[in-house]
Amino acid sequence: MTTILTYPFKKLPTTSKWALRFAIRPLSCSSQLRAAPAVQTKTKKTLAKPNIRNVVVVDGVRTPFLLSGTSYKDLMPHDLARAALTGLLHRTSVPKEVVDYIIFGTVIQEVKTSNVAREAALGAGFSDKTPAHTVTMACISANQAMTTGVGLIASGQCDVIVAGGVELMSDIPIRHSRKMRKLMLDLNKAKSMGQRLSLISKFRLNFLAPELPAVAEFSTSETMGHSADRLAAAFAVSRLEQDEYALRSHSLAKKAQDEGLLSDVVPFRVPGKDTVTKDNGIRPSSLEQMAKLKPAFIKPYGTVTAANSSFLTDGASAMLIMAEEKALAMGYKPKAYLRDFMYVSQDPKDQLLLGPTYATPKVLEKAGLTMNDIDAFEFHEAFSGQILANFKAMDSDWFAENYMGRKTKVGLPPLEKFNNWGGSLSLGHPFGATGCRLVMAAANRLRKEGGQYGLVAACAAGGQVRERGTN
């Protein structure tokens, strides 16, 4: 999905065909590791629509994003979500009773708190009269939470929405096998000792084998990493190019962290442990060290490794969204306007991760903008190969004509405007929470760099994508 946001100044069927086309189009990031310098403020159109309420981002926060299995490993998802909500309340001082609705995204649900939005809201002290629901749309779950809130505000149903997301990969549900589950359910229904003994006699030792969850497509049984490897091969993205891009992401994230630019991060005191204050997955390495890693998915010839992939992450995010007139009446200065957004879906096998290429031109045309108008790009980095393959597709007239039904290419996002404070490869990717991080990164960059238009894009399992814009 993609989105346009504005800063408020004034108020593939076969891989062989792709490989042949793209083998001579290398990309290199090694010479562009620095963030873009601040730019002069440009005055452009506002993108406001007649008779439609303006929707603004007041502010947004997130817990530090941590590698799974570290400081958050003993928590539950609603603990992190509650921490994000509490951090948002502290950051904005918004009265709890003013919030009309709370929406959170998540992917791998904890059975005990299936509506994690409601449980987190109650834990954070919101009234039990404040409705809350949870949405899931793979890696764009928080994006769906936000755009659902935008719809509620634009339609006049609500004035104030809190949207966010959470994921806790440290403690994912592991189920008994289906045979064991069926046996236990039948035992629970048995009414006599004879019935119970008869059922127990059917037990076999292999019933105890657990069912482990996998980050894989249900329709293809293929892991996303495997898809990324095939996509990189199809677009002739080399291992070196992927490692260079990953190094860029970590280097920019470390620079942003050291300079205090990741201002959306709020400290979180983990019960029984120390207070966590920053992301712990930012680890700039060297190309020499990265080259030593073995392929993670397609062995031994793949190019996707642990170093050029996003890692399993725990974290939560939350954002305060309001109707503009409500925000101004309460004395808030909006950080950004949420303008247009677009969801698209592609073939989940060969084009699983190419959604940004398809959605970007659509959301730009919807907003009446071009690539040159965008001041801050924030794309979700699932894998280096995924980002670079999208770059090649977006920069190809042939791909546009043969796969997108367009006469000309989308155009390549300028790297000096792209993910300047790091991305999911370095900051981490809690599936349900990344969307809010992307939007806040774009909004904060526009504010810092003097830009007006931002574009956010994220691919997701199922071949779906969301694009959004802000100003």
Image (cartoon, rainbow, N blue to C red):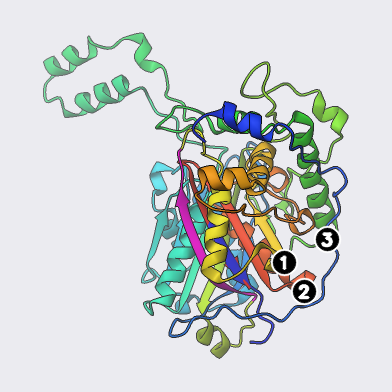
Mark 3–mark 1 distance (CA, rounded to whole Å): 10 Å
- Amino acid type of the residue that numbered disc 3 sits on in the rendered structure: Ala
Magenta range:
335-347
For the point 16% across and 12% down, which residue is it? 198
Residue toward you, 81 or 350: 350
Tag 3 near tag 2, CB within 8 Å: no
User: Is residue 84 inside the magenta stretch?
Assistant: no
Badge 3 or badge 1: first in the primary sequence: 3
**Mark 1 highlights which residue?**
375
- Measuring from the top left, give residue 308's x and y in whole percent: 72, 35
User: Percent x, y for residue 215?
Assistant: 51, 33
Q: Which is more N-terminal, label 2 or label 3?
A: 3
Cα distance between the residues tagged 2 and 1: 9 Å
Residue under circle 2?
Answer: 450
Q: Residue at x 56, y 31 (%)?
A: 227
Q: Nearer the viewer, residue 363 or 110?
A: 363
Labels 2 & 1 near each other (Cβ < 8 A): yes
Q: x, y (%) of residue 35?
A: 83, 57
Q: In this rendered view, identify the residue nearer to me: 69 or 355.
A: 355
Q: Callout 1 environment at 10 Å: few (<14), some (14 to 19), or many (20+)?
A: many
Outermost residue on the front side: it is 407
- From the image, give the main secondary structure of the stretch colored magenta: strand
Pick whichever of labels 2 and 1 is earlier in the sequence: 1
Numbered label tally: 3
Label 3 SS: loop
Front-most of 351 and 404? 404
Question: What residue is drawn where x is 38% and y is 76%?
Answer: 155
- Residue 76 in view here: no
Q: Tell me the CA gap for discs 3 and 2.
A: 11 Å
User: Where does label 3 land, which residue?
Assistant: 36
